[in-house]
C-alpha cells in the first residue's frame, strides 16, 4: 500500500481522502465530538459559543476537511523545502495515520485547530537561515506565536521552541533575540492596555496560560496502550531512517530537520506541563512526528518494512474504531 503514496501524482490526493475515511471509519456511525475547555483560549471560546451546534451536525465532514488540509499543507511544505531525497505524499499519509492512533485525537479540539498555526510558525522558521530581512521575519514569528498562545494556551511552550530554533538557524545577535521577544510580548501588552482602559485588568488571568504539572492520563486504557506502542514503534523506525539520509542533505535542510527535532522534544512535554489539557494537547506533536514517521515510509528502497509498519498502524486504528463504535 505504501507505494501508492510514494508518487508525486495529484491523483494521490484521492488516495489520501480514502485513507482518511478508512482511518476514521467510526465517524460514519459515531458523531465526532467537540472537546473544548473554556480556559484553553480563544479557539475554545469560539468552538463552544459559536460553532458547537453547527459542528455537531457536520462534525465528521469538518474534521476530515481539517486533518486533510493540515496533512496536505505539511506535505507540500516539506516537499518544497526538499527535506526528503524522494518526495511524494508519505508525509500526508503519516499525518492521517497518526490522527487515528488515539481515541482522544478523533475530536474537533482547540489543539487540532492550533496545528494550522503551528505549521505556519514552522514555515516562518525555515525561512530564517538566509532571509534578507531577519528582524522583520522574527518580529512576525513573535506575533504569530503570541496569537497562537492566545488562541490555545498550552502552545505557550512554543516560546521555548522559537528561542531554541533561532539559536539553531542563525548566529547569535542580541538585536534579533530582542526583536523576537518584543514580537512575543507586544500582543499581550496591547491586551493588558485594552483591559486596563476598560477597567477590567483583573480578568487578564483568563487570557494567560495556567501551567500545572501532572500526568495527562492516570490509568491507560487498552486503546491508549496500543496507540502509544504503535506511535513509539513508528517514531523509532522514522528516526532510524532519517539518520541514514540526513547527513547527505545541505546544511539548511539539516537545520530545518533540527528545528523539527526540537519541536518533537519540546511539544511532547505539553500534556505534562498543562495537565488540564490532557491527551488532546498531544495532537500538537503530530506536525513534527508526521515528518519523522514519513522517513520510515519514503526512504527504504525495499517496501517490506514500510508495508509492515503501515499495516501495524492500520491494525491499531481498526481496534480504536471498534472501541469508539462499541463504547
Image (spheres, helix red, strand yellow):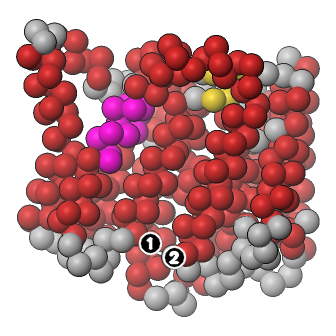
**Residue drawn at (91%, 65%), measured in percent from left and top?**
1
Q: Which residues are magenta?
A: 144-156
Residue that numbered label 2 is attached to: 81
Give the left or right position of residue 49, taking residue 172 as reference: right
Would you identify the image quadrant in which residue 294 lies? bottom right
Horizontal side, residue 175 vs residue 250: left or right? left
Q: Residue at x 23, y 78 (%)?
A: 132
Image quarter of the C terminus = top right
- The image shows residue 196, relative to residue 227, as above or below, that is above
Image location (x, y in percent) of residue 256: 44, 72
Compared across the picture, whether 151 is left or right of 315 comes to: left
Say if mark 2 contacts mark 1, CB within 8 Å.
yes
Residue at label 1?
A: 256
Q: Is residue 177 above or below residue 7?
A: above
Circle 2 SS class: loop
Residue positioned 35% across, 53% down in the render: 161
| Residue 147 among those drawn in magenta | yes
Amino acid at each position: 500500500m505504501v507505494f501508492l503514496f510514494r508518487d508525486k501524482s495529484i491523483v494521490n490526493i484521492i488516495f489520501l481522502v480514502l485513507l482518511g475515511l478508512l482511518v476514521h471509519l467510526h465517524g460514519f456511525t459515531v458523531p465526532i465530538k467537540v472537546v473544548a475547555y473554556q480556559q484553553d483560549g480563544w479557539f475554545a471560546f469560539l468552538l463552544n459559543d459559536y460553532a458547537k451546534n453547527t459542528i455537531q451536525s457536520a462534525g465528521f465532514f469538518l474534521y476530515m476537511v481539517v486533518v486533510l488540509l493540515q496533512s496536505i499543507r505539511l506535505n507540500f511544505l516539506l516537499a518544497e523545502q526538499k527535506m526528503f531525497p524522494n518526495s511524494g505524499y508519505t508525509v500526508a499519509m503519516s499525518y492521517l495515520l497518526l490522527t487515528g492512533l488515539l481515541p482522544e485525537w478523533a475530536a474537533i479540539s482547540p489543539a487540532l485547530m492550533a496545528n494550522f498555526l503551528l505549521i505556519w510558525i514552522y514555515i516562518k522558521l525555515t525561512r530564517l537561515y538566509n532571509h534578507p530581512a531577519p528582524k522583520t521575519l522574527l518580529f512576525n514569528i513573535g506575533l504569530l506565536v503570541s496569537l497562537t498562545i492566545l488562541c490555545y494556551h498550552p502552545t505557550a511552550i512554543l516560546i521555548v521552541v522559537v528561542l531554541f530554533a533561532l539559536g539553531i538557524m542563525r548566529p547569535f545577535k542580541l538585536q534579533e533575540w530582542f526583536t523576537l521577544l518584543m514580537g512575543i510580548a507586544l500582543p499581550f501588552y496591547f491586551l493588558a492596555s485594552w483591559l486596563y482602559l476598560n477597567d477590567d485588568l483583573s480578568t487578564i488571568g483568563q487570557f494567560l496560560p495556567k501551567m500545572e504539572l501532572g500526568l495527562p492520563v492516570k490509568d491507560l486504557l487498552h486503546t491508549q496502550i496500543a496507540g502509544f506502542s504503535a506511535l513509539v514503534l513508528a517514531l523509532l523506525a522514522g528516526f532510524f531512517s532519517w539518520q541514514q539520509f540526513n547527513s547527505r542533505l545541505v546544511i539548511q535542510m539539516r537545520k530545518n530537520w533540527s528545528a523539527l527535532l526540537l519541536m518533537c522534544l519540546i511539544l511532547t512535554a505539553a500534556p505534562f506541563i498543562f495537565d488540564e489539557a490532557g491527551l488532546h494537547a498531544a495532537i500538537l506533536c503530530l506536525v513534527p512526528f508526521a515528518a519523522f514517521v514519513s522517513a520510515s515510509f519514503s526512504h527504504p528502497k525495499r517496501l517490506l518494512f514500510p508495508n509492515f509498519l503501515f499495516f501495524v498502524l492500520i491494525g491499531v486504528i481498526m481496534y480504536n474504531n471498534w472501541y469508539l463504535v462499541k463504547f
